[in-house]
Image (spheres, rainbow, N blue to C red):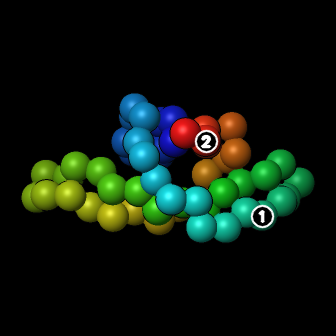
Amino acid sequence: MHDPPGAPGVWPGLLVEWRQSEGGWHGRVTYAVAGPHGTVLVEAWVPAALLEQR
């Protein structure tokens, strides 16, 4: 995933679900980011344009 909200950069994640809305496709993903007190697991809906298969 590229530049999710609040965590710029490229992050590995797990795509859990797809949905389509008027704005296009979005994926529900989970990913881990480094927080001030350790690693944090995040779950968010993000635009498909931010996702890349690897």
Residue 16 on image: x %, y %: 59, 67
Label 1, residues with CA under 10 Å away: few <14, some 14-19, many ≥20: few
Counting residues from the N terminus, which is met first, the one under dot 2 or under dot 1? 1
Question: At 58% across and 59% down in the image, what residue appears?
Answer: 15
Furthest residue in direction left, as rendered: 37
Q: Is residue 46 above or below residue 1?
A: below
Residue at label 2? Answer: 53
Residue 41, located in which quarter of the rendered image?
Answer: bottom left
In the image: residue 28, left or right of residue 39: right
Question: At 84% across and 59% down in the image, what residue appears?
Answer: 21
Residue 27 on image: x %, y %: 66, 57
Judge whether residue 50 can be spotted in this image: no
Q: Nearer the viewer, mark 2 or mark 1?
A: 2
Taking depth in this image into account, of 54 and 29 the one nearest to the observer is: 54
How many numbered marks appear? 2
**Disc 2 on helix, strand or loop?**
loop
Judge whether residue 38 can be spotted in this image: yes
Residue 3 on image: x %, y %: 48, 36
Say which amino acid is labelled 2.
Gln
Say which amino acid is labelled 1.
Arg
Question: At 70% across and 45% down in the image, what residue appears?
Answer: 48
Taking depth in this image into account, of 52 and 26 the one nearest to the observer is: 52
Taking depth in this image into account, of 41 and 14 the one nearest to the observer is: 14
In the image: residue 2, left or right of residue 34: right
Which quadrant of the figure contains the C terminus?
Answer: top right
What label sits on residue 19 in the rendered view? 1
